[in-house]
Image (spheres, rainbow, N blue to C red):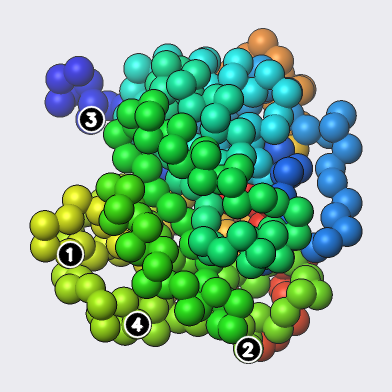
Amino acid sequence: MNMMTESRKPALIDRFGRHVTYVRMSVTDRCDFRCVYCMDEKMTFVPREQLLTLEEMGRLGRAFVKLGVHKIRLTGGEPLTRRNVMQLFNELGQLEDLRDFTLTTNGSQLPKYAQQLKVAGVTRINISLDTLDAERFRSLTRIGQIEQTLNGIDAALAAGFERIKLNAVILKNRNHDEIIPLVQFAYDKGIDISFIEEMPLGVITEHDRAEAYYSSDEILRDLRTQFELAPIAVNTGGPSKYYQSPGSKSRVGFISPHSHNFCDDCNRVRVTAEGRLLLCLGQEHSMDLRRVLRAHPLDEAPLLAAIQEAMSLKPKGHEFDLKAKPILFRHMNATGG
């Protein structure tokens, strides 16, 4: 594609001049784990009939790419538990202008799906792993077995994706003592790892978020007792800031919604599994795209117009406060990863 054609492509630009080029689409709010920072122990899930169909999700993906989006991440819940989900991966993977097609998963289903995902066109996989201790893993996930995720990591490595990254949510007195072993594990596997500050989405009962908060700065301080880490200039389209050790191909990232707010250059929106376009992770500004999809099943123009109109709703940023009651009652599994 020549530069003239590229410059004429539609673009999603919000009222603060930020270009939206990255969409995270949730295919389900259900999961085969119950991670303590993601959902309550007794969750009420969206009735299946209220979820977008896979065909509707495919329409949405095509619309976003037509509007200049070049990165799509499929999330959940656990996306690979959605029945016939490979239909959606195969469809989106064929979009010519989609440069980065990514999956976030807990890894449990990767032994079954990793090779199919690679063939479908998935470029990168993020795998959640918060601990290397089997008992602690079961405690943090409530019902998961660590072998499921470890086997999934090996299956992804065997499939040969461009990049594989671990995501670890660090909680003080839960798993903050495993920061160094987790990085060493990533180094040994030749994969990346990102540490994520917990986000206050939904009411949980397992822990006090303010007391469990462990900042990116504290994590980096701990890591530098064992690893030489220097910042590197790399952009994967998301909010991670990366560091690297000399001689290692692995990258260590930090996603810091509290300690280093990343809203000024936000290029992302989210679509929930029931078709609500969320303009900000930490605010309720949204638009109902399911209504538009179903009102105009054969006409894409209203859908394109609705997505463009929604850019005027995108706020300047989130306002997380760990000490306050949650301002958002949707849990992370409902938000979409």
Q: Are marks 2 and 3 in contact (CB under 8 Å)?
A: no
Front: mark 3 or 4 = 4
Q: Earlier in the sequence, mark 1 or mark 2?
A: 2
Quadrant for residue 276, please give it: top right
Residue 283 appears in the rendering: no
| Chain-order first, disc 2 or disc 3 | 3
Q: Which residue is mark 3?
A: 7
Query: In the image, residue 147 lies at what x, y percent?
Result: 59, 46
**Residue named by callout 2:** 211
Q: Which residue is mark 1?
A: 245
- Above or below residue 134? Residue 87 is above
Q: Which of the two labelled residues, at mark 4 and mark 2, occupies the earlier sequence position?
A: 2
Q: Is residue 187 left or right of residue 337?
A: left
* Residue 295 seen in this snapshot: yes
- Amino acid at dot 1: Ser
* Marked residue nearer the N-terminal end (1 or 3): 3
Amino acid, disc 3: Ser
Residue for badge 4: 222
Q: Secondary structure at mark 3?
A: helix
